[in-house]
Image (cartoon, grey):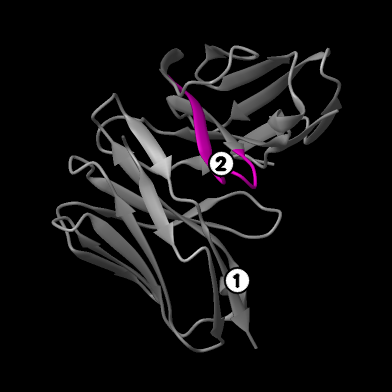
Amino acid sequence: ETGVTQTPRHLVMGMTNKKSLKCEQHLGHNAMYWYKQSAKKPLELMFVYNFKEQTENNSVPSRFSPECPNSSHLFLHLHTLQPEDSALYLCASSQDPGLSGNEQFFGPGTRLTVL
Amino acid sequence: GENVEQHPSTLSVQEGDSAVIKCTYSDSASNYFPWYKQELGKRPQLIIDIRSNVGEKKDQRIAVTLNKTAKHFSLHITETQPEDSAVYFCAAYFYSSASKIIFGSGTRLSIRP
């Protein structure tokens, strides 16, 4: 699979577990994003990274912790989640999130279920 | 605050007819408005976008119009086909608080054969 890849594709975890979601982009882009997609809020931006630096944290609870070691990789570390955190977590990348706006390329998502 | 409203939430049209989805946004400084299509079980993909320096853009059966004064933009699909069935999201870039994109709540479009 090319473009933006995500692992795992499905994850079931208990509220006391710690897990991580991984995203990798093969497009040479400089910006990466985490989104949450649920029935309640179809596409909710969580975090923005531009050139490995976090530029946006959309009031996300601290039980979600992002990490961007380089422009190609993005992680979302999860701990002590709640059942309402169950959702599809989508990663995306773009050439640059700058003021001009540009196309976001989405990964296939990780379907997360918190028991 | 920054907001994008999208209507309708569901839309069913006869194959061959046209479909129109409308969005309004709150920040007059926004200047980039993309539309994404998400088929069932698949990832969202950009289908068309428009910038604030134009009022209309067309790509085959798909067109988007923008009214900056009224702060609304619309997606028009003509001669609808079964493969147009999907959820469509509008979005707007906001610059009042760093660079940020906000998506509408989505429209589930169904094409009746």
- Quadrant assignment for the C terminus of chain B: bottom right
Q: Position of residue B25 (x, y in %)?
A: 29, 49
The residue beneath circle 2 is A106
Q: Is residue A75 above or below residue B37?
A: above
SS label for mark 1: loop
Of circles 1 and 2, which is in front?
Answer: 1
Q: Residue at x 26, y 58 (%)?
A: B72
Chain at numbered mark 2: A
Secondary element under disc 2, as helix, strand or loop, is strand
Which residues make up the magenta segment?
A37-49
Q: Are marks 1 and 2 in contact (CB under 8 Å)?
A: no
Q: Position of residue A40 (x, y in %)?
A: 61, 44
Q: Residues within 10 Å of mark 2 (few under 14, many from 20)?
A: many
Residue in the image at 35% along x and 32% along y = B100
Q: Quadrant of the N terminus of chain B?
A: top left
- Quarter of the image where one finds residue B65: bottom left
Chain bearing mark 1: B
Q: Judge whether residue B14 is colored magenta.
A: no
Q: Amino acid at mark 2?
A: Phe
Per the rendering, the mark at residue B85 is 1
Residue B56 makes an appearance in the image: yes
B52 left or right, relative to A74: left
